[in-house]
């Protein structure tokens, strides 16, 4: 038997049946029409936002849209946050369609096409520059439009977020401008007549180490002050990135967000003089929405092979690539999962939960202990609110995308 990760405490049962947003999975599936189905519980998201506001009263909250761009979810999140960070013009259209004001967006990403830059400038979307070459293209396009672009510079710092699941800063990276070259670029932007808004520093993601995040945030503030002094500017915004993780696997502990908040609030109050007019923000995606999502998939078949039991479900890695262990995971471990229709029952057997794709990679649960599941029962896979549907190869083998709904 291999353990699975912890089921988020937000989810409870009624007479042994999993509830999501106060409703049974059977009722949700009937409303949606079928499985596989992603369900996003806005109550969970709202509680995360409230927790953030309490811990970080002086810090603005941005939603990192790449975590989950489902249109209805973004529409519900938009009034709860102060800004939305996007990484493509397609994400810009999603955010604008959800009612986010163009000036509250921040368009990052290392490969912006001229047409995308043109479209962003045309709608008044601020652009986060990833290189000197991109800066020149943006300035040229803005000049041709006789416009004044709003720009930030993404900094590739000389440090990284210790223990992060995905390191985005430090060393040679395709993201941002190496810190030593940033002051000259900022001066070029100001001299060209653009509006320089500030710095974006993203050192890493999916960290459960509060000390490492506190350390990275302190280093980011110090670096921003150093760059501002060298460039002779007073930025209005410092985006400190995100990095807040959620526990996926057995043995992982919930991030101590309140301790991070206390440290960052103290650092903000004592920020250097050159940053006295600078507002700080954090961009969070996974931490806001990851635990709000549940992927529901129905058992199609039970089979035995070589002394092992396999539950074949109607979903798979084409919807939940991360849960299959094929999205940046070196060692395959089990996401939290349960038999939704027997949510409080004791484990009775060790099984493999496999999707219906013709590949051995399509395994959603590996030698995991569950109550006995019959054909027709529903398996719930948790932590499906971030990097689920949109980060999975839904066209693979032609089975199509999963349904999605917000409750």
Image: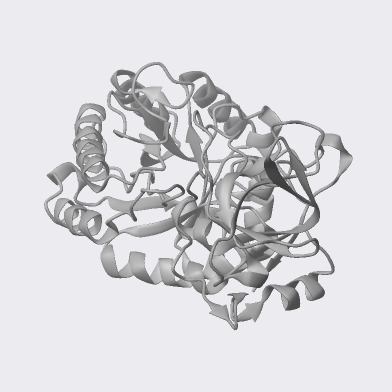
Q: Would you identify the image quadrant in which residue 169 lies?
A: top left
Query: In this picture, is 36 found above or below 88?
Result: below
Q: Can residue 6 be seen in this view?
A: yes
Q: Looking at the image, what colour scheme do you see?
A: one colour
Task: Note whether residue 90 is visible.
Answer: no
Of residues 262 and 398, the one drawn nearer to the viewer in this rendering: 398
Q: Residue at x 46, y 49 (%)?
A: 248
Camera-side residue of 353 and 169? 353
Instruction: Give the residue drawn at x 27%, y 50%.
Output: 278
Residue 364 position within the rendered picture, expressed as x and y whole percent measured from the top left: 64, 45
Q: Name the residue rendered at 44%, 55% in the picture.
A: 287
- Toward the viewer: 328 or 310? 310
Q: Is residue 111 rendered to the left or right of residue 170?
A: right
Residue farthest to the right, as pictured: 398
Residue closest to the far top? 172
Is 148 placed left or right of 339 in the picture?
left
Quarter where residue 70 is shown: bottom right
Residue 75 in picture, x, y percent from top left? 63, 66
Q: In this view, does 70 lie above or below 275?
A: below
């Amino acid at each position: 038997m291999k353990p699975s990760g912890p089921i988020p405490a937000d989810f409870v049962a009624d007479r042994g049946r999993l509830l999501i947003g106060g409703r049974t999975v059977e009722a949700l599936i009937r409303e949606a029409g079928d499985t596989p189905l992603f369900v996003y519980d806005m109550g969970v998201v709202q509680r995360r936002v409230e927790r953030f506001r309490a811990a970080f009263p002086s810090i603005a909250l941005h939603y990192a849209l790449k975590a989950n761009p489902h249109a209805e979810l973004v529409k519900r999140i938009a009034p709860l946050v102060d800004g939305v960070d996007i990484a493509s013009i397609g994400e810009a259209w999603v955010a604008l369609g959800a009612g986010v004001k163009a000036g509250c967006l921040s368009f990052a990403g290392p490969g912006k096409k001229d047409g995308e830059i043109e479209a962003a400038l045309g709608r008044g979307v601020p652009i986060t520059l990833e290189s000197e070459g991109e800066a020149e293209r943006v300035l040229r396009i803005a000049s041709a439009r006789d416009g004044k672009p709003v720009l930030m510079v993404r900094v590739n710092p000389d440090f990284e977020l210790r223990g992060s699941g995905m390191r985005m800063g430090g060393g040679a990276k395709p993201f941002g401008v190496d810190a030593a070259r940033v002051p000259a670029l900022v001066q070029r932007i100001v001299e060209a007549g653009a509006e320089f808004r500030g710095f974006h520093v993203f050192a890493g993601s999916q960290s459960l180490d509060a000390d490492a995040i506190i350390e990275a945030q302190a280093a980011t503030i110090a670096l921003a002050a150093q760059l501002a002094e060298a460039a002779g500017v007073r930025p209005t915004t410092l985006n400190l990135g995100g990095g807040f993780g959620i526990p996926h696997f057995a043995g992982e502990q919930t991030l101590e967000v309140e301790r991070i908040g206390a440290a960052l609030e103290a650092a903000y109050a004592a920020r250097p003089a050159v940053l006295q007019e600078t507002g700080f923000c954090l961009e969070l995606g996974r931490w806001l929405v990851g635990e709000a999502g549940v992927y529901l998939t129905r058992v199609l078949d039970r089979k035995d092979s070589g002394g092992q039991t396999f539950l074949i479900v109607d979903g798979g890695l084409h919807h939940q690539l991360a849960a299959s262990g094929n999205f940046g995971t070196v060692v395959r471990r089990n996401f939290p999962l349960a038999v939704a229709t027997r949510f409080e029952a004791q484990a009775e057997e060790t099984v493999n939960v496999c999707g219906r794709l013709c590949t051995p990679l399509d395994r959603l649960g590996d030698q995991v202990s569950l109550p006995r599941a019959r054909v027709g029962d529903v398996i719930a896979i948790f932590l499906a609110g971030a990097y689920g549907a949109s980060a999975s190869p839904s066209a693979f083998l032609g089975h199509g995308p999963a349904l999605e709904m917000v409750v």
